[in-house]
Structure formats: structure tokens, C-alpha cells
Image (cartoon, rainbow, N blue to C red):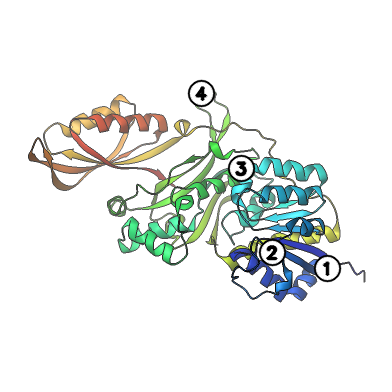
Amino acid sequence: MIEYRNVRVALLGGGTVGAQVARLLLEHKEEFASRVGASLELTGIAVRNLDAPRSADLPKVLFTTDAESLILGADIVIEVMGGLEPARSYILQAINSGADVVTANKALLATHGTELFEAAERVGAQLYFEAAVAGAIPIIRPLRESLAGDRVKRIMGIVNGTTNYILDKMDTEGSSFEDALAIATELGYAEADPTADIDAFDAAQKASILASLAFHTTIPLEKVHREGIREVTGKTVELAKKAGYVVKLLAICERLTNPETGKEAVSARVYPALISREHPLASVHKANNAVFVEAEAAGSLMFYGAGAGGPETASAVLGDLVSAARRHIIGGPGLGASTNANLPVLPISAITTRYHVTLSVFDRPGVLASVADVFGQHGVSVELVEQGTFGSEAVSGEAAPTATLVIGTHAALESDLAATVSALAQLDAVSSVVSVLRVEGA
């Protein structure tokens, strides 16, 4: 039996994920060796602060602040430090030194992915990134490998656990946005500064990665339309619930026809949307993630599980590590990321969608006709109209009766729908536009 030398592994980052990667790698060393065909030797853990507390009890001799020396002596480099720099420079250094790289850094891939993949291709190195999207859920490898021979038509997913937890609390318990966010922060789902999550920066980065893989086209982060959940109120969630919907922050990547040229194009976008309670994504609760993939031959596929957490993300990292180590033992070229399709990315205005518009209108004759006229003027067909609760609003010092009007539309161009809502807001009969949500998954 041939005995192979140890595969040297350098770990960059000793935070929540990094500590769990190191713990599992050390605890299951013999099992990993049997899977790989050689021992995986953790040569060190590069950190910024040697004295920072860790989520696992690890040998102090492994820790160092000298990341560059670790990189130069490694066969495989694992990057879980996060951020753009120095992570980008370290990964490029690892690739150029001949090492394969495993990363969980979604922000880096969404921003500098093209540069990193091109660098890896030049030297025959491999860049693995299963942990960058949806934590423990295996979605990158299926898109990159299993569905590489298929034609992915659409991806729709819940890819941010913090926002899903907040929206789920609002839906199931009637919590306000502020209370749900406070609980999410207390439980560690949300950071002290939750901007990346609730303003959908995190989800947009993941949408960029998923769309690039699914459509073999580079999707720059700046071309991913992004709307967060700050404007989702308890009233919005309550009205959605009465109509048979649940509000979810969705990442949507789809293959479309450009309405101007008639040629194929793609769209990547993130926003809060209504999903029928009968749709599989409606049953994704708490901080879990789920990704729904529609492919031409494979049909509908759903990937579900924990989207974050130290051990969960570490699982995805270690899966990539085993794959990378096996490549070192067996040999052969790596699997490159194909971006040769070069499909144009459509702006949000060019997509076709449906709206669910809630208006507060003055309760007087002719209101419904004037509202319907606005829809007609913009070529938007109304599917349903429901009148809800009554109230009042002070107008010229007197209380004027108001009513809630809920209007659902048929599918139309986003630009036409947006223009319709803008015109409705200017109507004398409309007190306010309470909420506007797109309807997905129908």
C-alpha cells in the first residue's frame, strides 16, 4: 500500500467558524485520514489577536500572527477570517504559491470572485467555497457539478437566517420588527450592527454567487437589485397573513428574455416578497435557510437546513477540505467555475412580476373607480380587490373616514407596476400607500 505524506493545512481565522473547523479537524483526524488517504496536518491558525477568547479549546502552539509563513508552507489554505482585506491578498498569495483554497467568504467572492478564479485557473489551483452560501446546506456543489449538464431556469431562496428569524417571529407571534430584531440580537443571530442582514447586503452577495454559478455568467454585486426588510411592519405581515401569504426575504436568480431585444438574459435580485403559505419556502422557520432550484431536466429541487452557526458552517468547510485533499492525493486538474455564457444582466425595471398593494383611501364615492383608472392608464391588470379595516385621518382639522384597500395585480413589467404605485400615491383619494410587496412563487 502506498503511503502519502501529510497534507499540510493552514487555517486563516480563529473566530466562531475557524475554531470549530480546527476542533473538528483535530478530533476526527484519523477518520479524515481514512477518507482522504493521507493525514491532514493542521500546521497553524493565523489570527489577529493571540489572546482573544475562542469557542473551542485548542492547543495554543497552533496560533500565530504570521499568516504569510503559514500560507507558504501549506498545500491547502482555509480562509474563514472574513472581510475583503487582507483575505483577498492572502488567498491570491496561497493560489500563486500552488495551494488550493477553501473559503467561506461570501463578500470577497461577490466582490473579487472573477479575479480569484482567474488566478486559480492560471496556475491550476482550485478554489472551493461551499460554506459561502447557506452554511451547512450543500448548494454550491450541486450547482457547480451536479447540475452543470442541466439548464437552471430559476433559483429562489431564503439565504439569510437573521432576516428569516425576524420575519418568522413577526408572522407566528405577532412581534414587532423592533422586538424581533432585539431577540435575534440577544440570541446571536443578528450582529450589534445588523445592517448587513436587514438591509440585505448579505443576501445580495449570496445571490451574486448563486446566479454566477447557475447561469455560467459573471454577475457583479452592483447588478444585484437589493431591498431590505426595514419597511416591513407588523401591519404588513398581518395583512399578508389574512390574504394567505407569508413575508420572506428572497434571493431570486432567473433566466429571462430581454423584453427589448428578445434575447436571453438573467436577473438577480433580493427583496421581501409574499409567498403562498402552500409553497415549500413558507414552511422555513426561525433562522433556517432554504434554496429552491428549478432546472429544465431535473425539475424542482429544494435544499434546506441551517444557514449559519460555527459547527454548521464548519461542516461545509471541511467537506471542501476533504475534496481538496483528495485532489492532492489522486492528482488531476481542478474544477473551474464556468462563466463563458456572458449573458446580460437585466435591471429590476425589466423583470415581470406581480404586486400586492395596500392603500389607505378616503371613504367616499368614486374612490375605487379613480384607483382602477390609474392601473388602467399604466397597462396593469388588476386580479383582486379587497376592502379591509376602517379608520379615520385628520384632514383640514377634521376627521375624515378612511378604508384599507388591498389590490393584487396580474403579472406585469416592474417598471409599469412601479409607475402605477407612484401615481397612486399622488391621488387625492389615497391617504397613503401602506405597503407594496411583490408576489413570488405562484
413 and 308: which is toward the camera: 308
Residue 305 image point, x, y percent: 54, 62
Query: Disc 3 marks which amino acid?
Result: Thr
The first of marks 3 and 4 along the sequence is: 3
Label pair 3/1, CB-CB below 8 angstroms: no
Q: What residue does disc 1 label?
A: 37
Residue 392 image point, x, y percent: 12, 44
Q: Marks 4 and 2, Cα distance to the nearest angstrom? A: 45 Å
Residue 51 image point, x, y percent: 63, 69
Left or right: 294 with respect to 185? right
Left or right: 245 with respect to 27? left
The first of marks 4 and 2 along the sequence is: 4
The first of marks 2 and 3 along the sequence is: 3
Q: What residue does disc 4 label?
A: 260
> Do we see residue 274 in this rendering?
yes
Label 3: which secondary element: helix
Q: What residue does disc 2 label?
A: 318
Displayed quadrant of residue 330: bottom right
Residue 111's disc is 3
Q: Marks 1 and 2, Cα distance to the nearest angstrom? A: 15 Å
Query: Disc 4 marks which amino acid?
Result: Glu
Label 1: which secondary element: loop
Residue 221 lies, with reference to residue 275, above or below; the image says: above
Q: Residue furthest left?
A: 398
